[in-house]
Amino acid sequence: MAFSFTKWQGCGNDFVLVNGFSERLDEEDLAALAQKICDRHYGIGADGLILVLPSKAADFRMRILNADGSEAEMCGNGIRCFAGVVHDEGLSDKEEFTVETGAGILVPRLQLADGKLQGVRVDMGEPTLAGDRIPVLGFGAAHVVEQPIEAGGETLSMTCVSMGNPHCVIFVEDAEAVPIEKLGPLLERHEAFPKKTNVEFAAVLDASHIRMRVWERGAAVTLACGTGSCATLVAAALTGRTERAAEVQLDGGRLQIEWAEDNHVYMTGPAEKVFAGRRE
């Protein structure tokens, strides 16, 4: 299957993006294609494959497949890269536009200087806190805040949030010391999460700074997670650890997150084109 693509990264979270307005991919083979493309030894190498598509409900539609071939509802770093492609390939002359995702319609706003992309601010919508809608089993519609969960012989304290996809936030003293490769997969596939979950290990540095490392559902350890950063800020504010706006420091960079008075979460961060190519 031959097609042209671009590769983008946002805080080190990297994606292969295909412009579905000019390229056609066989939808029946997307899962297998994503696995091949994302393989860092035998493919292009990425955390996910993103398709830029037309939409009947918004200006554009975004589909994202993880490195393991599973399809995610949304990706925060991915939607900034998506917005970068829209701008870079001249698909829209708007600075703000709507994107249909599996998590609903989201609104990126380009940050430009002399026509060049400096970053993207995204209205990520409202966080979901009801346990049965995240989903987390055993809590009904109640919020899942600082509740115990066992993994790897340890009892951890979790706060769960959905940003259109599920997140389990674990606050720790030292994010660097967490055995993320051990605990991450155990929590991702824990029986409490019927759709699996993303897992964030976060250390609050002060009321406006958080250090976070992430194990992403379907992608393992990544350098950054946009929805995970949003979920972490919401969890930190819910538990009184931070204000409603903070900088989240990730392995691959920094994101500015705000849980605003309108109950929407706003994420601001970079999106950078790495290269363009063609797969034959």
Image: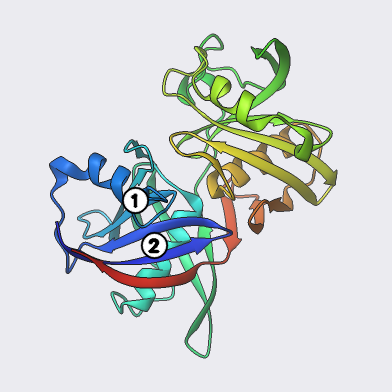
> Residue 172 placed where, x, y %?
79, 31
Rendered image quadrant of residue 127? top right
For disc 1, the marked residue is 42
The mark that comes first in sequence, 2 or 1, is 1
Quadrant placement of the N terminus: bottom left
Name the spot of residue 232 as percent of width and height, x first.
66, 40
The structure residue drawn at horizontal position 47% and vertical position 57%, both measured from the top left corner, is 14
The kind of residue tagged 1 is Tyr
Residue 249 picture location, percent across and down: 71, 53
Number of numbered labels in the structure image: 2
- Residue drawn where x is 52% and y is 12% of the image: 140
Coloring applied to the structure: rainbow
Q: Position of residue 229 (x, y in %)?
A: 62, 46
Q: What kind of residue is marked 2? A: Phe
Q: Residue at x 78, y 34 (%)?
A: 177
Tell whether label 1 touches label 2 (CB within 8 Å): no
Q: Secondary structure at mark 1?
A: loop
89 is higher (above) or lower (below) than 13: below
Q: Is residue 176 above or below residue 251?
A: above
Q: Is residue 78 above or below residue 161?
A: below
To which residue does mark 2 refer?
A: 82
- Give the Cα distance between marks 2 and 1: 24 Å
Q: Nearer the viewer, residue 212 or 6?
A: 6
Residue at left offset 52%, top offset 91%: 114
Q: Residue furthest bottom?
A: 114
Front residue of 152/256: it is 152
Quarter occupied by residue 269: bottom right
